[in-house]
Image (cartoon, rainbow, N blue to C red):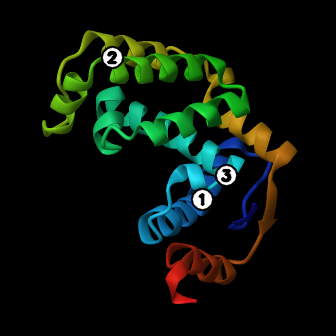
Amino acid sequence: MKVYLLPTDLQNDVDLVENFHQAICGFHSGQVGKLRKELSDIQCPEIEIYCALRYEGEVRNGGHNQYIFNLGGDQEEFAVALSGLRLIGADKQADILRRMIHWTKAEPDEVQRRLETFPPHVEQPVLEQLDDELFAIPEEVSLYPLAANWLRANGDMEIVTDEEWSAIDENLRNPTRH
């Protein structure tokens, strides 16, 4: 899938990955939010990586409790994120997410309790242990460098002007306007 990026330093992991995430967010919003497509119907590695980045972002912002809550316990997106982690070689993160998925399937009542509680923090030792493990992963094997390396080696990216990017993003977010 062609990914259009704002002018960025492709050698800077943070710039590249955040720019990529922003670009794919528009596509995800349009396809899943507006067209109501299922993630499994969108077969592309960029969506898998986007979901992997979303996983880490949610967990770093509020733990696995927040990730489960904000995704509404969506097993499909959990699986796509797991695939994205494996794709970029984030083995430690993939193992942690795999165990979270196993827990959510084994404890549906606990998951439902999380979905019905706001704010979404309900103490759960298993999830807190997974949080601690994710936070302890060394920087050199964190998602940004792994995703950036994958994108540089495999991504179909094009740098566009701010104006071009705004128009592309608008079209991606609102695919029914065409």
Gap between marks 2 and 1 measured at Cα: 32 Å
- The image shows a total of numbered marks equal to 3
**Residue depicted at x 80% and y 51%:** 155
Residue 159 place in picture, x, y as percent: 78, 68
Q: Earlier in the sequence, mark 3 or mark 2?
A: 3
- Disc ID at residue 83: none
Q: Which residue is mark 1?
A: 24
Q: Earlier in the sequence, mark 2 or mark 1?
A: 1
The amino acid type, in three-letter code, at marker 2 is Ala
Secondary structure under tag 3 reads loop
Q: Which residue is mark 2?
A: 106
Residue 46 place in picture, x, y as percent: 68, 50
Gap between marks 3 and 2 measured at Cα: 28 Å
In this rendering, which labeled residue sits more in front, label 1 or label 3? 3
Q: Earlier in the sequence, mark 1 or mark 3?
A: 1
Q: Which residue is mark 3?
A: 43
User: In the current view of this chain or complex, which residue is farthest to the left?
Assistant: 117
Q: In which quarter of the view is residue 140 placed?
A: top right
Question: Quadrant of the image for the N terminus?
Answer: bottom right
The amino acid type, in three-letter code, at marker 1 is Ile
Q: In which quarter of the view is residue 122 placed?
A: top left
* In this view, 133 is above or below 72: above
Question: Quadrant of the image for the C terminus?
Answer: bottom right
Residue 137 place in picture, x, y as percent: 56, 16
**Residue depicted at x 27% and y 19%:** 107
**Residue depicted at x 54% and y 79%:** 175
The amino acid type, in three-letter code, at marker 3 is Gln
